[in-house]
Image (cartoon, rainbow, N blue to C red):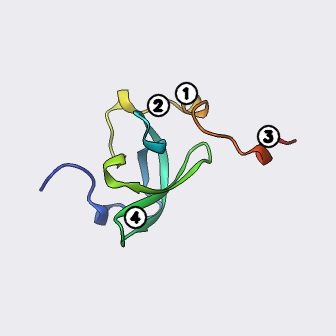
Amino acid sequence: VGSGTDIHRILPGDEVQARYKGSERFYKATVTKVNAEDHTFDVKFYDGAKEEGISKKNLHKEVPKELVAEADESESEYETDPEEEKE
């Protein structure tokens, strides 16, 4: 039945890998919402960044290990919230 992700198999709370803002690499994330209307997903990345409306081509349950960025590598690519930087 084809490649890619079956929207009906991914549920809120599922751990996935997703491309942050369409980057080349996949990053670990948790699905926070499945948008059935437009077949997209909202996710929260492990560093706290959030993204809405990720298409199924940019989200997978399993990704080859060489395409998944390590946590410390991904942190430098995410935008930080200025409020979080204040101590």
Marks 4 & 3, CB-CB < 8 Å contact: no
Residue at 37% from the left image edge and 31% from the top image edge: 67
Percent position (x, y) of residue 84? 77, 45
Residue 73 is tagged as 1
Q: Quadrant of residue 55?
A: bottom left
Which of the marked residues, 1 or 3, is nearer the chain's N terminus?
Answer: 1
Residue bearing the label numbered 2: 69
- Tell which residue pokes out farthest to the bottom in this image: 37
Residue 11 is tagged as 4
Q: Secondary structure at mark 2?
A: loop
Residue at 47% from the left image edge and 31% from the top image edge: 69
Nearer the observer, 6 or 36 = 36
User: How far apart are the alpha carbons under marks 4 and 3?
Assistant: 32 Å
Question: Seen in the image, is 40 located left or right of residue 74?
Answer: left
Q: Secondary structure at mark 3?
A: helix
Residue bearing the label numbered 3: 85
Marks 2 & 1, CB-CB < 8 Å contact: yes
Q: Amino acid at mark 4?
A: Leu
User: How far apart are the alpha carbons under marks 2 and 3?
Assistant: 23 Å
4 vs 1, front mark: 1
